[in-house]
Amino acid sequence: MIENLYQFYFNQGLGSAKNDYLTLAVESLKKAVVLKADAAEAWDLMGLCYYRMGRFGNSRFCWGQSASFSRLWQNDIEEEKLRLCLQQIEPLLKKKRFKKAVRIFEKMTASIEGKAHLLSFAGMIKLKSKDYKGAVSDFTQALTIDRSNSKAAEYLIYINKMNKPVWTILDVFKTLTGKVKK
């Protein structure tokens, strides 16, 4: 019975992860590892989901739970880069120097692109600097990686309500679904 429940939640998490619903995948995988704490494949997949979301500490913990995972050290390097970057831009954010903060953030995180939470963070800074087009691009990319990223979706709706003519709901739909009219 417990094995069947574990398999159900693992498969649900795997399906969500394959479809880029990373937050939902993590929720299912958490249930799976509660049922079977020694399930290396569930810990590995949850670590990968957290990694793609930009939550490096969580991914490191998950991968630490799995004795067979070998890419742990790369994760530490990226987390350290991010920590140093945030230390540099924090004073700029406090002084409301958003454009300079964006430049530094993008330069220092270029090697760790494609992480949903990093893209959302960059989008928030661009939104504050009134770079609406850049913010929309980052939030849309974050949703492409993790379609269940509610914060990115909320910010896109917020920008749309501000009547900034940089995108339409249809543009975002086309980006997320890959359906583009020619």
Image (tube, rainbow, N blue to C red):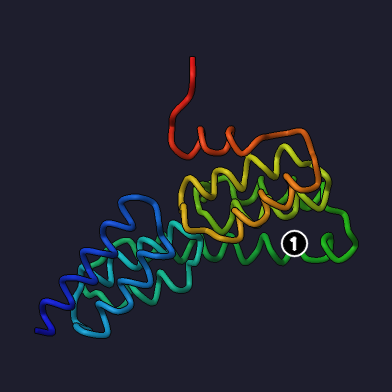
Q: Nearer the viewer, residue 146 or 37?
A: 146
Determine whether, in the image, residue 104 is placed left or right of residue 92: left
Which three-letter amino acid code belongs to the residue tagged 1? Gln
Above-or-below relation of 19 to 42:
above
Q: x and y percent of residue 110 in the render?
A: 58, 45
Residue drawn at (79%, 39%) of the image:
164
Residue drawn at (78%, 53%) of the image:
101
Residue drawn at (46%, 66%) of the image:
76
Q: Residue furthest top?
A: 182
Q: x and y percent of residue 131 in the render?
A: 79, 41
Residue drawn at (83%, 48%) of the image:
129
- Determine the image quadrant of residue 150: bottom right
Above-or-below relation of 24 to 58:
above
Q: Nearer the viewer, residue 121 or 7?
A: 7
- Determine the image quadrant of residue 71: bottom left
Q: Residue furthest right?
A: 95
Determine whether, in the image, residue 61 is placed left or right of residue 107: left
Q: x and y percent of residue 14 in the render?
A: 26, 60
Q: Nearer the viewer, residue 175 or 70?
A: 175
